[in-house]
Image (spheres, grey):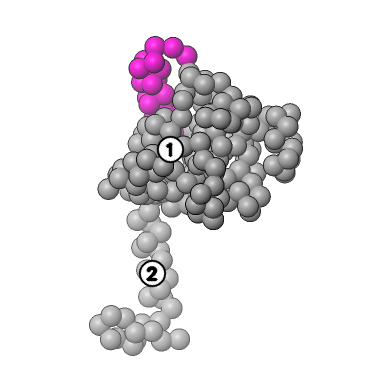
Amino acid sequence: MIYQNIEGNSEIGLPFFVALIKKHYFCCMIKEIYFAGGCFWGTQHYFKQICGVIETATGYANGKIENPTYEEVYTDLTGFAETVKVVYDSNRIDLKLLVELFFKSIDPLSLNRQGNDIGTRYRTGIYYVDDTDLSIIRQVYDRVVQEYGCKLCVELEPLQNFYLAENYHQDYLDKNPNGYCHLPTALFEFARKQNR
């Protein structure tokens, strides 16, 4: 198979594309972090606005059963928190800024409640998969503790498990622009301006 490059050279084949993919892959440092910020519809939409975030997904984290449904999580008997998986390029945005932006989107003193959403499934938390990330997260977390002068109601734990939410929960506010959201729309604009 022969492809033309922008100089019109038609001698380039599959090896060119393999090299191009490798170059792109190695210049990116793909990492992930999980944020529970109340209703995951708004939290996902918020993080999708941030430059350097590559992918997001809504789901259920750190619960007690396998493959929970929304209906099961809604009972508050499964131990799951509505959570957003955030995949990012650490060469374009660092974890410290992501954690700082997370704290801008929550009330860290509210236990099992964000906005009008109440229940343990709406608790706040930061769940990490890479132990080396803990010290970075802890710097921001401890600074927020100092700012408030009291203990936060934000879990800081390793991710134990994560199950994707049903398809209708994925990118909900993209599909339903006038749908319910506990976050103010001004916060989405704020997120778009970060890391530019």
Give the SS element for disc 2: helix
Whether residues under marks 1 and 2 lie with C-beta atoms below 8 angstroms apart, the answer is no
Q: Front-most of 146 and 123?
A: 123
The prevailing secondary structure element of the residues shown in magenta is helix
Query: Tag 1: Cα neighbours inside 10 Å, few (<14), some, or many (≥20)?
Result: few
* Residue 115 point in image, percent of width and height: 52, 29
Left or right, 113 with respect to 6, comes to: right
Residue depicted at 72% across the width and 43% down the height: 69
Residue depicted at 44% across the width and 43% down the height: 46
Label 1 sits on residue:
184
One can see residue 7 in this view:
yes
Query: Which residue lies most toward the top here?
Result: 149
Location of residue 43 with respect to 119 vertically, above or below: below
One can see residue 31 in this view:
no
Magenta-tinted stretch: 133-151
Q: What residue type is disc 1 on? A: Pro
Q: Quadrant of residue 10?
A: bottom left
Q: Front-most of 160 and 38?
A: 38
Label 2 sits on residue:
19
Location of residue 123 with respect to 164 vertically, above or below: above
